[in-house]
Image (cartoon, rainbow, N blue to C red):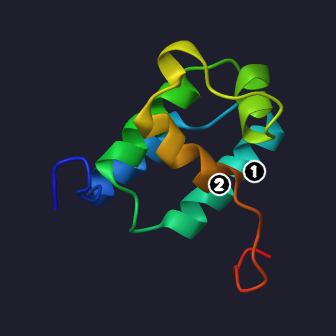
Amino acid sequence: MSATESLLDPAELNRLKWRCRRGMLENDVLIERFFQRQQGRLTAAQAQGLQLLIDLSDPDLLDLLLGRREPQGELDCESVRCVLPLLKAPIQETDPTH
């Protein structure tokens, strides 16, 4: 497993979760569902992409999460493109948050 494929340790995951807290409820809900689905499976590369996304304003992040626009500029990178579909994934019937 390469460095970008390595899983985040619990302390790193908790720091990332704290940093992902948003002012817009819609973003919080989507991000929280992402963490529930990815618990224990989040890689360093995915975390890197998520950190780039959470630096966006709430409206810009929501546009990406809802598929109203695609990543552009510095966001058009592999780490963002690997985590964005996971953030946008619909709730599955087997999802315990459903």
Question: Which residue is found at the position 58% from the left and 68% from the top?
Answer: 37
The alpha-carbon separation of the residues under discs 1 and 2 comes to 5 Å
**In what element is the residue under mark 2?**
helix
Report whether 5 appears left or right of 38.
left
Query: Which residue is at the far left?
Result: 2
Which residue does the numbered mark 2 point to in the structure image? 32
The quarter of the image holding the C terminus is bottom right
Question: Which residue is found at the position 65% from the left and 54% from the top?
Answer: 32
- Would you place residue 64 above or below residue 87 in this image? above
- Label 1 close to label 2 by CB (< 8 Å): yes
Residue nearest the viewer, comparing 23 with 70: 70
The quarter of the image holding the N terminus is bottom left
Which quadrant holds residue 97? bottom right
Q: Residues within 10 Å of mark 1 (few under 14, many from 20)?
A: few
Q: Residues within 10 Å of mark 2 (few under 14, many from 20)?
A: some
- Would you place residue 86 above or below residue 25 in this image? below
Callout 2 amino acid: Glu
Report whether 26 appears left or right of 47.
right
Query: Which residue is at the far top?
Result: 73
* Position in image of residue 56 (x %, y %): 62, 20
* Position in image of residue 67 (x %, y %): 79, 38
* Position in image of residue 69 (x %, y %): 77, 27
Question: Which residue is found at the position 70% from the left and 59% from the top?
Answer: 89
**In what element is the residue under mark 1?**
helix
Question: Which residue is found at the position 79% from the left and 83% from the top?
Answer: 93
Number of numbered discs present? Answer: 2
Q: Is residue 15 visible?
A: no
* Position in image of residue 91 (x %, y %): 76, 69
Q: Is residue 47 visible?
A: yes
The numbered mark at residue 29 is 1
Callout 1 amino acid: Val
